[in-house]
């Protein structure tokens, strides 16, 4: 029996096309039904041009559904891939620009800090509506694969409002381990690794080849990152970035998020213009990323129109692997964001953590890790308090919890006074009020 896979927020520039292509590369999934929902007809039309050309080339004969109606897309769905960006670029620009007025600079602003909390509040409102719809119209046992940030806030909120399985997915673990393998000139297929923590603040605790620890070699090369002029030979290693090399040197392990983004998670790297310059951290890269993604998507659409778009290579995303394992009962191992419940002993039970998971017909089964190193748990804990307070703000519709979330944020409270944080909270909530119905300001 074929499965139905629904993409919600299908106009996403970065994910829908490659995830759909990944899915249809799996023999067991080739007869699945596909539905694509977005609030933008223009984006759906462009996606249709892209996908129609791809589906024609691979001889997929079913007719996908493209719709503006979420309920129609979700009806009968076995798997839901969530890709929304509530409020779009306009709302995200407010997340970046309002804090900047207070001297609080951000790089991406989609996961933590003022921008992440604001985006999380908007997204939780939508997730609640989506989950309630899934409960009524989707197939029994339907599973949500969430690619929308902020992962921790979204997964924690979903666990509070619905019993629908809601799994957070990212590519930072597999992306970082590939970078680390290149940095020490070891084929990726020959390394073994373990990662644990929270999304974007997970740490590679094991990094080996044939049982030999590769960290000494990585750390031997690490000081090279601080050279002003990086030679061509150092470029692969330099791609890891200065901030997270510094974090590794100080805390012992490589973090899974980029140097540009990691500055938003810890209170050490965004405090002053001098620090940002020394560590080559650029603020407001979210806007540049969106502009680049928009241009790249438009280029792909045009190539599809001209019948010149190359066939995509398999991506490193986990979505297709999870669906394939659940449908075929051929197990796979991935990293996912799930509620802790004792998986990491020294992090809060209700936190969203990123851990190894085994997948088969029984679904996503997280693997218990035990205790992570104390110094790393401390870094994760700082962010977890922000996430918990943001989720509580959404559940209670109470602005005080937003204020307390920003008071807890390690970057915000390292730069702003309590009065400034209170003023910032009010201004952000006022700016985003159209997305926060019933919220007490």
Image: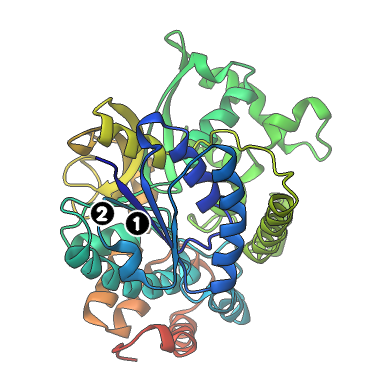
Q: Disc 1 or 2, which lies upstream in sequence?
A: 1
Whether residue 407 is visible: no
Residue on which the image places disc 2: 351
Q: Quadrant of residue 108?
A: bottom right
User: x, y (%) of residue 344?
Assistant: 24, 40
365 relative to 13 in the view: left or right: left
Image quarter of the N terminus: top left
The disc at residue 152 is: 1
Q: Is residue 141 above or below residue 126?
A: above
Does residue 140 sit above or below 397 in this rendering?
above
Image coordinates for residue 286, horizontal then vertical, percent: 62, 63
Residue 92 percent location from the top left of the image: 55, 73
Front residue (pair 397, 312): 312
Contact? badges 1 and 2 (CB < 8 Å): yes
Q: Residue at the top extreme? A: 210
The residue tagged with tag 1: helix, strand or loop?
Answer: helix
| Residue 120: mark in rendering | none
Residue 269 located left or right of residue 400: right
Q: Is residue 348 visible?
A: yes
């Amino acid at each position: 029996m074929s499965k139905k896979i629904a993409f919600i927020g299908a106009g996403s520039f970065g994910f829908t096309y490659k995830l759909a292509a990944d899915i249809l590369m799996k023999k067991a999934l080739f007869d699945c039904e596909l539905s694509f929902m977005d609030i933008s007809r223009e984006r759906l039309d462009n996606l249709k041009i892209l996908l129609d050309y791809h589906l024609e080339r691979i001889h997929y004969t079913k007719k996908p559904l493209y719709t503006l109606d979420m309920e129609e897309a979700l009806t009968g769905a076995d798997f839901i891939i969530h890709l929304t960006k509530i409020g779009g670029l306009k709302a995200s620009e407010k997340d970046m620009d309002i804090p900047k007025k207070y001297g609080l600079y951000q790089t991406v602003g989609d996961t933590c800090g003022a921008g992440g909390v604001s985006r999380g509040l908007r997204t939780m409102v939508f997730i609640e509506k989506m989950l309630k719809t899934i409960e009524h119209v989707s197939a029994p046992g339907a599973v949500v694969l969430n690619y929308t940030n902020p992962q921790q806030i979204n997964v924690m909120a979903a666990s509070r409002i619905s019993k629908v399985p809601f799994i957070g997915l990212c590519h930072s673990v597999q992306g970082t381990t590939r970078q680390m393998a290149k940095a020490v000139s070891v084929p990726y297929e020959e390394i073994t690794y373990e990662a644990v923590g929270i999304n974007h603040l997970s740490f590679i605790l094991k990094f080996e080849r044939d049982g030999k620890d590769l960290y000494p070699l990585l750390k031997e090369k690490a000081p090279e990152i601080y050279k002003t002029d990086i030679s061509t030979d150092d470029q692969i290693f330099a791609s890891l970035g200065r901030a997270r090399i510094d974090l590794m040197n100080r805390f012992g392990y490589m973090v899974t998020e980029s140097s540009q983004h990691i500055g938003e998670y810890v209170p050490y790297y965004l405090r002053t213009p001098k620090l940002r310059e020394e560590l080559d951290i650029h603020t407001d890269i979210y806007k540049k990323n969106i502009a680049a993604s928009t241009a790249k998507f438009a280029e792909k659409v045009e190539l599809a129109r001209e019948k010149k778009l190359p066939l995509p290579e398999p991506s490193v995303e986990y979505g297709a692997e999870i669906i394939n394992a659940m449908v075929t009962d051929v197990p796979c191992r991935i990293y996912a964001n799930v509620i802790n419940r004792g998986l990491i002993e020294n992090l809060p039970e209700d936190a969203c953590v990123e851990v190894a998971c085994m997948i088969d017909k029984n679904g996503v089964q997280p693997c218990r890790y035990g205790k992570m190193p104390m110094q790393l748990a401390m870094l994760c804990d700082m962010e977890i308090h922000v996430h918990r307070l943001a989720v509580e703000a959404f559940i209670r519709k109470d602005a005080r919890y937003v204020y307390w979330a920003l008071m807890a944020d390690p970057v915000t409270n390292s730069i702003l006074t309590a009065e400034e944080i209170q003023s910032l909270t009010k201004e952000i909530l006022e700016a985003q009020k159209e997305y926060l119905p019933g919220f007490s300001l």
